[in-house]
Image: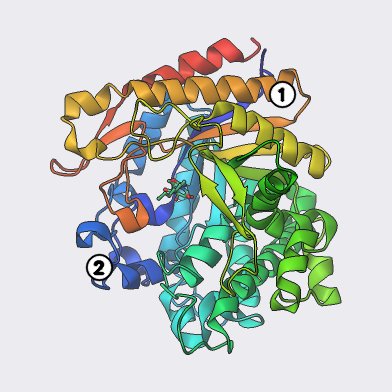
């Protein structure tokens, strides 16, 4: 069991979750700044104003990465630092752009390979107000294309690009459950697109087209000299049928992945939505125009995989409600025979299931023709971790075990199953703003002391990562 010597491993973060400094150097507000101001949306009314203060601590973060032995670092750019109003006719903020260019230079200087995410959920607020943001089929992809071009041009030294992080979350959590910004729910009586139960499908479609536009720009205008690669990052859990004897559950376990992952990956690899979605949703899904299909199909140089957990899937009968996003099924922690998806002695909210990770890598590899895969996020947290003392938090044995099991399962997918996983980035380099959960939930391999000037203290899991990869990688 081993990973190739050039395997890229490291840690990941996202701009809004770590940067803070939301007013600095001409940054414009994003939909998350606005969302944080709505009462009751974020645990304890938290916001991203200070977060980990990474905007002012780039040197410290790079030193930490170096200390941990990280070969690469995945981070995202704040669009509204670069183009405060967001649009293609709006001014570019040179200071914002310079900040990231310098950061990439400093990473490279430290021997760390940058992986840049262009969009990790923090849309410039103005675009939401101006034309409905991600819901706008013509304006949004064009503005994203322009933003991407500005960035590619300014940061040619970065060779690894991710267009969108988890468009499933932007679509479903932002426009169906309302759990994330901009907080639209599927039961709203008014929708700019006529039917609020369709918003998530429209947003997903527009993200795909925007992704396709950015990839085209990169390939046509930059890649010939750049030799870089570009892809999208999709999230999805591993699945098992609740009752392996019931063909309907076996089918539902695949359908769950299709509704989460193939929703985006099938258009990218095959130029069409999955049959299971077309069957349930019919013309409630947007139809690709010829131009859109040409932009989207074949637009991944690699597959970015975010992965956390697995679940048992039980099919449902009857007609699903209009706003069903799962595919007429339910997800459970226990199988029919009472097996738990993960270690039930610990109250994990994300129950670890390394075998499910290996299975999903195989599922994706088979369906999409063994693409290069980068695991752009994988990690865990426990409920109420923040109720522990700092000393206890630093001894995060549950997280050490998680990474140990997951990385070994991945290494088997590579060396025994022939899957082409090229990198693994742990979520997260440090504790940070965990969206609707504020600072309560900690996913960091490094503890951040928010009460004492955001000081960083590596947890056991951070310290052990290097050893783990030394063990599973060829010399
Ligand atoms: O911080 C986010 C991490 C944490 O866990 C990151 O920004 C996202 O890209 C990604 O979605 N992240 C993530 N995903 C797993 C969440 C599982 C949610 C389970 C909900 C149970 C109530």
Q: Nearer the viewer, mark 1 or mark 2?
A: 2
Q: Quadrant of residue 63?
A: top left
Q: Residues within 10 Å of mark 2 (few under 14, many from 20)?
A: few
| Mark seen at residue 40 | 2
Q: Residues within 10 Å of mark 1 (few under 14, many from 20)?
A: many
Name the residue rendered at 67%, 12% in the picture. 1
C-alpha separation, residue under disc 1 versus residue under disc 2:
44 Å
- Tell me: residue 38, above or below residue 267: below
For numbered disc 2, what is the local secondary structure? loop
Residue 468: x %, y % from top left = 50, 16
Which of the two residues, 140 or 103, is positioned nearer the viewer here? 140
Asked if residue 259 shows in the view, the reply is: yes
Circles 1 and 2: CB distance less than 8 Å?
no
Name the residue rendered at 26%, 71% in the picture. 37
Residue linked to disc 1: 414
Q: Does the Cβ of the disc 2 residue fall within 8 Å of ligand 1?
A: no
Q: Does the Cβ of the disc 1 residue fall within 8 Å of ligand 1?
A: no
Q: Which of the colour schemes (rainbow, by chain, secondary structure, one colour) is used?
A: rainbow
Name the residue rendered at 18%, 24% in the picture. 391
For numbered disc 1, what is the local secondary structure? helix
Residue 436: x %, y % from top left = 34, 58
- Tell me: residue 124, above or below residue 275: below
Residue 318: x %, y % from top left = 65, 66
Of pointers 1 and 2, the one earlier in the residue sequence? 2
Asked if residue 88 shows in the view, the reply is: no
Q: Quadrant of residue 216?
A: bottom right
Image quadrant for the C terminus? top right
Residue 245: x %, y % from top left = 71, 36
Left or right, 149 with respect to 277, comes to left
Which of the two residues, 397 or 223, is positioned nearer the viewer here? 397
- Tell me: residue 82, above or below residue 142: above
């Amino acid at each position: 069991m081993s990973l190739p010597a050039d395997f890229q491993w490291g840690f990941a973060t996202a701009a809004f979750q770590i940067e803070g400094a939301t007013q600095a150097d001409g940054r414009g507000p994003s939909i998350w700044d606005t969302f944080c101001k709505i009462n009751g949306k974020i645990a304890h009314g938290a916001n991203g104003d200070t977060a980990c203060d990474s905007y002012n601590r780039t040197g410290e973060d790079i030193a930490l990465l170096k200390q941990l032995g990280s070969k690469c670092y995945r981070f995202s750019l704040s669009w509204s630092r670069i183009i405060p109003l967001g649009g293609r006719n709006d001014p570019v903020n040179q200071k914002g752009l310079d900040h990231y260019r310098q950061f990439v230079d400093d990473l490279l200087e430290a021997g760390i390979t940058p992986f840049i995410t262009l969009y990790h959920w923090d849309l410039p607020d103005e675009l939401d107000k101006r034309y409905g943001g991600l819901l706008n089929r013509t304006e949004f992809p064009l503005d994203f294309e322009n933003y991407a071009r500005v960035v590619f041009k300014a940061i040619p030294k970065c060779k690894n690009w991710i267009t969108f992080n988890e468009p499933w979350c932007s679509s479903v959590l932002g426009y169906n459950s309302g759990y994330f910004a901009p907080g639209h729910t599927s039961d709203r009586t008014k929708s700019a697109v006529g039917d609020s139960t369709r918003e998530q499908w429209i947003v997903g479609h527009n993200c795909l087209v925007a992704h396709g536009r950015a990839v085209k720009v990169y390939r046509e205008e930059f890649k010939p000299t750049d030799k870089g690669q570009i892809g999208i990052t999709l999230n999805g859990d591993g699945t098992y049928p609740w009752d392996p004897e019931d063909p309907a559950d076996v089918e539902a376990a695949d359908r769950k992945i299709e509704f989460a992952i193939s929703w985006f990956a099938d258009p990218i690899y095959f130029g069409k939505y999955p049959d299971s979605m077309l069957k349930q949703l019919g013309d409630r899904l947007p139809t690709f125009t010829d131009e859109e299909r040409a932009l989207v199909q074949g637009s991944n140089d690699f597959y970015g995989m975010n992965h956390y957990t697995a679940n048992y899937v039980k099919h449902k009968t009857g007609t699903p409600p209009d706003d069903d996003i799962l595919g007429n099924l339910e997800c459970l922690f226990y199988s029919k025979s009472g097996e738990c998806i993960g270690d039930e002695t610990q109250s994990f909210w994300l129950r670890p299931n390394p075998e499910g990770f290996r299975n999903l890598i195989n599922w994706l590899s088979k369906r999409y023709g063994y693409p290069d895969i980068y695991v752009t996020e994988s990690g865990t947290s426990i409920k109420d971790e923040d109720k522990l003392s700092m000393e206890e938090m630093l001894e995060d044995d549950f997280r050490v075990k998680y990474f140990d099991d997951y990385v070994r399962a991945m290494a088997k997918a590579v060396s025994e199953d022939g899957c082409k996983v090229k990198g693994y980035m742990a979520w997260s380099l440090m504790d940070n703003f965990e969206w609707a959960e504020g600072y309560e939930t900690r996913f960091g391999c490094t503890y951040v002391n928010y009460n004492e000037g955001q000081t960083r203290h590596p947890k056991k899991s951070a310290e052990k990562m290097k050893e783990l990869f030394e063990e599973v990688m060829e010399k």
